[in-house]
Image (cartoon, rainbow, N blue to C red):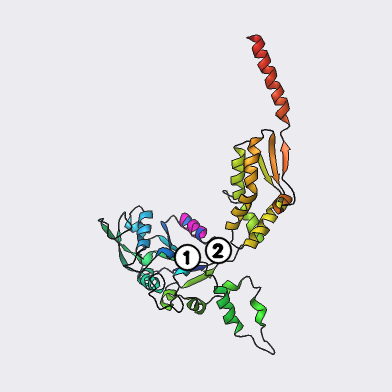
Amino acid sequence: MDEIEIEKSNMLMIGPTGSGKTYLVKTLARLLDVPLAIADATSLTEAGYIGDDIESVVSKLLAAADNDVEKAERGIIFIDEIDKIAKKKNTNSRDVSGESVQQGMLKLLEGAQVEVPVGASSKNAMVPLATVNTRNILFICGGAFPDLEEIIKERLRKNAAIGFNAELKDKYDKDSTILSKVTTEDLRKFGMIPEFLGRLPIVYTLNGLTKEMMIQILKEPKNAILKQYQKLLELDEVKLEFTDDALEAIADKAMERDTGARALRSIIEEFMLDIMYEIPKDDNIGQVTITKDYIMGTGGPIIDIRSNQITGKAEELKEVESDTAGN
C-alpha cells in the first residue's frame, strides 16, 4: 500500500510428543489455503554430506505448490524434530547434522534466493533450477525438546533459598505447565545457537493432553478412532458401543504411557483385536458394548444377540416352502 513492508515472524513450537504439533500446522495451511511442506530435521545434513540438503526443504514446498514459484513464495514450511539438530555436547568429531545444519538454515529463515531443482530432490539431477525467494515463506519449527524441562527447573531453582520469600527446591517438580516458562537462554543451553533462535522471534509451547482432551479426541473428531472401529464392525453388521466408564479407563491408560494421543490407538488396538476376529464369526451377534471391566481386564464386553434373527429365519423357511410347493 505504501513504503511500509510487513515482514513475517517465524515460529518455534515446543510441545510434548503426541500433543498435535504437526496436525496444528496442517490445519492452519488448509484454512489459509497455502501450500505446505513438512520436512524432518533429522535427515538434514551439512552441504556435501550424504542426507538431505537444507535447500531440499524449499524444493518440497515447490513440489507442493505444483512447481508454481509465486505460489510457493507464500507458503508455509514446517520443520519437525528441530530439537534433533541441537549442538552435541562435548564432542570433538565433526557434527554434520547438528550445529552446522542450524548455521546453514540461518540465511534460509531470514530470506534468501535459493536455487531449487524443479521436480527432483537432488541438485545433481539434470533438471532445470528455479529460483525461490524465501523472504515471505513462513517457517514453523517444531520439536518435543526432551529434557528441556530439567534445564528450566535448574534455572528456576537458582532462586531457591532460605528465609522469607524463599522458594522451595521441589516447588516445580509437579508443575505441568513448566514448559511455558521457557526462555531463549534455556534453548541455548539445550544446544540451539543464538543466531538461529534470533531468527525465530515467536516461541510458544503446547501443553500435554489432559484426560478430558483424550476422551474428546476419542469420540469427537469426524475421523475419531472410535468411529473408525465402529465402521469396521458395521461392515459385519455389528453395532459397537463404548460406555463412558470405558472411555475414561482408556484415557487413564493413555496418560500412564505418556506418549500423547498416539497412546490411544495402541491401547484400543490391544483390546479390539479379539473382538475384531471373534465377533464376525458369529452371525447372531448384533451389538457389542465395551465396558470398563473389559478394558481393565476384570470382565468381558456386553454382547447382545439379534432378536429378530430367529423370526426372520422362520419367515425365510416359509417362503422357500411355498415357492417349492408352487413350483
Badge 1 crowding class, 10 Å Cα cut-off, few under 14, some 14 to 19, many 20 or more, is some
Q: Secondary structure at mark 1?
A: loop
Highlighted magenta segment, given as a residue range: 23-30
Position of 178 with respect to 135 (left or right) is right
Q: Quadrant of residue 74?
A: bottom left
Q: Compared with residue 115, is residue 293 higher up or lower down, i.e. above or below?
A: above
Residue with the mark numbered 2: 17
Mark 1: amino acid: Glu
Q: Could you say where residue 238 lies in the image, as x and y percent from the top left? A: 65, 38
Can residue 324 be seen by looking at this rendering? yes
Q: Quadrant of residue 7?
A: bottom left
Q: Quadrant of residue 173?
A: bottom right
Q: Are marks 2 and 1 in contact (CB under 8 Å)?
A: no
Which residue is at a point 39% across and 76% down the rendered structure image? 93
| Viewer-closest of 294 and 217 | 294
Q: Quadrant of the N terminus?
A: bottom left
Position of 45 with respect to 288 (left or right) is left
Position of 290 with respect to 217 (left or right) is right
Which residue is at a point 38% across and 54% down the rendered structure image? 64
Which residue is at a point 72% across and 27% down the rendered structure image? 310
Q: Could you say where residue 255 lies in the image, as x and y percent from the top left? A: 64, 61
The numbered dot on residue 81 is: 1
Badge 2 crowding class, 10 Å Cα cut-off, few under 14, some 14 to 19, many 20 or more, is some
| Viewer-closest of 97 and 135 | 97
Q: Compared with residue 149, is residue 231 higher up or lower down, i.e. above or below?
A: above
Q: Could you say where residue 52 lies in the image, as x and y percent from the top left? A: 36, 63
Q: Earlier in the sequence, mark 2 or mark 1?
A: 2
Q: Could you say where residue 40 lies in the image, as x and y percent from the top left? A: 43, 62
Main secondary structure type of the part rendered in magenta: helix
Q: Compared with residue 25, is residue 233 higher up or lower down, i.e. above or below?
A: above
